[in-house]
Amino acid sequence: MTDLEGRVALVTGGARGLGEAYVRSLHAAGARVVIADLLEEEGAALAAELGEQAVFQALDVTDEAAWDRVVAASVAAFGSLDVLVNNAGIANAAPIEHLTLAKWDAVIAVNLTGVFLGCRAVVPQMKAQGSGSIINISSVEGMRGSPGLHGYTASKFGVRGLSQSLAVELGASGIRVNSVHPGLILTDMTTRIDPARIDIPLGRPGVPDDVAGTIVFLASDASRFTSGAEFVVDGGMIA
Ligand code: NAD
C-alpha cells in the first residue's frame, strides 16, 4: 500500500537535509520526484544521481510567479502531480525585544507564505485529477512554544492551521492535506542546538530518515482516509 509507482511528488527544499531524505524515500517507493530548491548545484546533483525518475527545478518558494512555472514544468516532465511536500523552511531566533521586523518577515515569508503559495499552485492540477496529497511540514514548534523562536513558532502554527482549513475545503475534491511536526532532527538547521540539553524519551535526536517513513505513508494509499491530521515525529519529546 506504500507503493508509489506512477505517482509524481514535488518536494520543496528537497536538495538537502530532511527534504533530501523525503526525495530519496519517495523515489525508493517508486515515485517520480521533482526536487525544488534554491540550491541549484545540490539539487541538480541529487536529480542526476536518481536518474530519469527525478528532475530538479530552481524555486524560491516565496516567488509567486515561479510556482506556476514549476508546477507546469513538473506536469510537463511527468504527466501529473500527485504529492506536494511543502518542506522548505528557515529558522531564526531572538528574544522578543531583539526580534527585528526583517527577521520576522523573512521567516513568515518562507515558512508560511511559501506553503500557502505552494498549496494554491498545485490545487488546480490536483482538482483536475480528482486526487492529491499535500503534506505540509510544520514542527513541534507548531504544537507548543519555545523561548526565542517567535517568528518560527508563529509560522509553524500557521502551517498547522492552514493545513486544517485546506483539508476541510479540499476533501470533496479528493485532495488530502496533513501536517507533519518533526522534533529535533540533526541537519544543517540544528547544528547550534545541543541535543544533550533536550529530553527525548527515545534517547537520541532524530536523523532525516526517521521522518521519511511518515512522508511516504502520507503520500501513499496507506493513508487514503487520513486528512486534516497532525503527525508528531519527535521521539516522544513533547509527550
Ligand atoms: P535545512 O536548512 O537543512 O534545509 C532546508 C532546505 O530548504 C534547504 O535545501 C534550503 O535551500 C531550502 N530552502 C530554504 N529557503 C528556501 C526558499 N525560499 N525556497 C526554496 N527552498 C528553500 O533544514 P531542515 O532541517 O532539513 O528543515 C526542513 C524543514 O523541516 C523546514 O521546514 C524546517 O522548519 C522543518 N523542521 C526541521 C526540524 C529539524 O530539527 N531539523 C524540526 C522540525 C521541523
Image (spheres, rainbow, N blue to C red):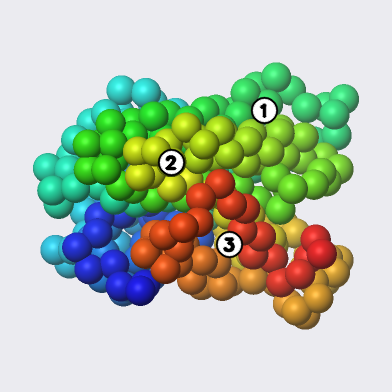
Q: For the residue labelled by badge 2, is the local secondary structure a helix, a strand or a loop?
A: helix
Q: CA distance from mark 1 to mark 3?
A: 21 Å
Residue 144 rendering spot, x and y as whole percentages: 80, 47
Q: For the residue labelled by badge 1, is the local secondary structure a helix, a strand or a loop?
A: helix
Marks 1 and 3, the one that precedes in the sequence: 1
Relative to 230, residue 153 above or below: above
Residue ID for mark 2: 171
Q: Are marks 3 and 2 in contact (CB under 8 Å)?
A: no
Q: Residue at x 75, y 59 (%)?
A: 193
Q: CA distance from mark 2 to mark 1?
A: 35 Å
Quadrant location of the C terminus? bottom right
Residue 148 rendering spot, x and y as whole percentages: 82, 40
Residue 96 appears anywhere in the view: yes
Is residue 46 rendered to the left or right of residue 118?
left
Mark 3, ligand 1, within 8 Å: the answer is yes
Is residue 16 rendered to the left or right of residue 56?
right
Is residue 127 rendered to the left or right of residue 102?
left
Residue 145 rendering spot, x and y as whole percentages: 82, 44
Residue 20 appears anywhere in the view: no
Q: Residue type at mark 1?
A: Lys
Marks 2 and 1, the one that precedes in the sequence: 1
Residue ID for mark 3: 187
Question: Nearer the observer, disc 2 or disc 1?
Answer: 2
Q: Residue type at mark 3?
A: Thr
Instruction: Judge the density around disc 2: few (<14), some (14-19), many (≥20) Cα neighbours within 10 Å.
Output: some
Q: Nearer the viewer, residue 31 or 54?
A: 31
Is residue 174 rendered to the left or right of residue 74?
right
Tally of numbered tags:
3
